[in-house]
Amino acid sequence: MLRIFERQIIRNIRDTKRLNTWSSLATAFNSIVNDESLVNISKKETGLFGILELKTENGFDILKNHALAQVDILIEEATSKNRKRKMVEIFDELSNTLCKVADMAEFVRIAHPDQRYVQAAEDACITISGAVEKLNTHRELYDSLKQITSNGDTQLTSDIDDHVAKLFLFDFEQCGIHLPERQRRRVVELNDYILQIGQKFMAGAVTPRTVNADVLPSVIRQHFVTENGQILVQGFYTDSSNTAVREAAYKLFLYPDKEQEYLLHELLHSRHLLAEFCGFESYAHRAVKGSTVQTPVVVKEFLNILNDNLQPKAAQDFQEMQKMKDAESRVKQELMPWDTPYFIAKAKKAWLNTSTDEFAPYLSLGACMEGLNFLTQSLYRVKLESVPILSGEVWANNIHKLAVIDEEEGILGYIYCDFYERAGKPNQDCHYTIQGGKQLSDNSYQNPIVVIMLSLPHPRWSNPCLLSPSSVNNLFHEMGHALHSMLGRTKYQHVTGTRCSTDFAEVPSVLMEYFASDSRVISKFAKHFQTQEPMPENLLYKLSASKNIFYASELQNQVFYSMLDQVYHSGKLTKSTTEILEDVQKEYYGLPYVKNTAWQFRFFHLVGYGAKYYSYQISRAIAAWIWQTYFHDNPFCRSSGDRYRKECLAHGGGKPPSQLVSDFLNKEANAVTFAKSLINEVDMKNLHVQRINVVQIIEKRSI
């Protein structure tokens, strides 16, 4: 017995030595952080984000009052006949002064667990919002900007200066300031109404459906939560192996709701009126102005080319799923929309003969952060370094702070990592800008500060936080946004980092997903959290392959959503939103519309991405194009990384996106090119899946 204990002790010592070989970055993220100052103000060395005033919530009053005083000074400068600076510089300082308070307050309002801070932050948001509204109606300020965009500034300007000045002017005119007073007031009223209607629609879109329990047979009812004779349906039950349960959940959750129907109609109608008042043919024309695609005509052309090419490829996916459904049932049943998520998940598990639990031990949070650091150093000569947090600097326990450090330029900015679940925290993965990058008047640089928010499980005493493949994907995605903020060294904060057109903003984050799916990249960091053994090659292969299964049908689904969004915003509605949905689904999706369902009432992206849902697919097309051109052969290529950093990331929104894409990829940014990029992607993924099937056949024969 003593020898057994002795061997166990020696084994534990070996494991400890192995653990100690992790980098300092990996060790930091595989550890637990506690900050006593969160509950003890006297121990605070500083305030939130290092701002002394925010040691207490009262600091928001100081910050917002200082911002308002500075705004008055800047307005006076902008409208003065003796102005000495470029108009665009004054406007950007105005924007920066307000955003530094508003952006931080908005994050604190959402993320801080202390209601005193939440309330103070919300009050600051309301105050700054009121100040912005006043600026939007300041005719003299608008006239001063209009004068220089039409006739040129009295100060010498560059192309970037002129581009950003026009962006400010467009933002001004979105509020109708250039219109006669009666029309301007109507635009303001419509904007307010659209905001209120949108909030109500979003709340309804995620509200569970409650129905009488007796609407379902008892054999199906037992799969649902039942209370006081009522069934609560919170989603689609996509992981259920029972077809009848999936069907019931789909039909109940998507059953038409009159209130949602009214809200959606009002939202779309009001947006169309707003667009007409502002001189646009439709809301879609207003939404895509200044984007990578520039007009709704290009959006629809892009989606139609994709649709034509995807139909036979998606049909093959559905045929495979139909075979899987036939194998599960004695009675022939057609494949339906409630089946696809279930069979996609089943195919990944069956074809790859593995589960996500097998990957997790090799994907500790610390290992993944080490992988990101290896990637940024390889591509950009930029390292991610965990730095100490002063007491009082953060809003919760287990927050990490990264300094982003360039080999030559030094610190580029800071990323706060709020990665773990907690009560009251939004359950979504997001990137928040706290402070945008900007060149200051003394030629120094205002470094960006951002927060990445994830919803990962807390580390246990026995092991660090272990990620699923999808969580790794999300981490890399959000880090793509953060790196865009860090490396976008723009002159103006109005166009810093992710402050660019919506259909380009997702490009850096989607591109990072390609790195997260590449076995050559994964092999650099995927190590067992206890032994540091690298992930076995067969698991690496399966992890990479899992992203390729049934890609054509999933992409077709996104094309359908994107076209529906475009049609809804293309003019005045002449049919009900459900009739439009049925028409679009018939043409753009391979599975039929289900009667007495209204999927669009759950489509909350119609609020935040109205007429812009296509942006996800354009961003994916550009990211795929960049990957295929620059990184497919070597994901660690320094010269490709340098070029991508200088010609894409560094500009933020300071260069028209269509020109940026065309210049970087040496090809015109048009619908045909974008669609071809995604179709090539589908073909490559299908080839990968075919190889999986061949390997399976060989393995079965060898058994």
Image (cartoon, rainbow, N blue to C red):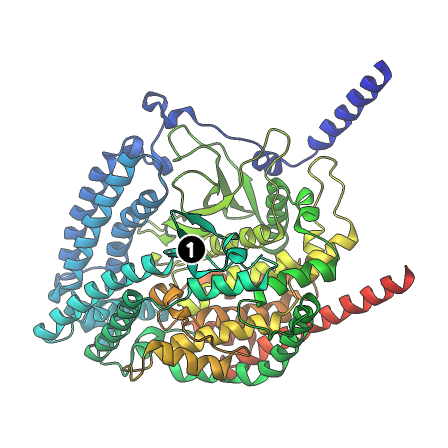
Q: Nearer the viewer, residue 250 or 604?
A: 250
* Outermost residue to the right: 702
> Which corner quadrant of the image does residue 317 belong to?
bottom right
Residue toward you, 142 or 160: 142
Quadrant location of the N terminus?
top right
Outermost residue to the left: 182
Where residue 219 appears, x then y in whole percent?
54, 56
Q: Position of residue 119 (x, y in %)?
A: 24, 40
Image height of 365 relative to 151, above or below: above
Q: Is residue 86 visible?
A: no
Say which residue appears at 69% left-offset and 32% top-offset. Answer: 19
Q: Is residue 513 left or right of residue 50?
A: right
Q: Secondary structure at mark 1?
A: helix
Give the residue at x 25% y 75%: 269
Q: Residue at x 30, y 30 (%)?
A: 55
Q: Position of residue 495 (x, y in %)?
A: 37, 61
Q: Which residue is mark 1?
A: 213
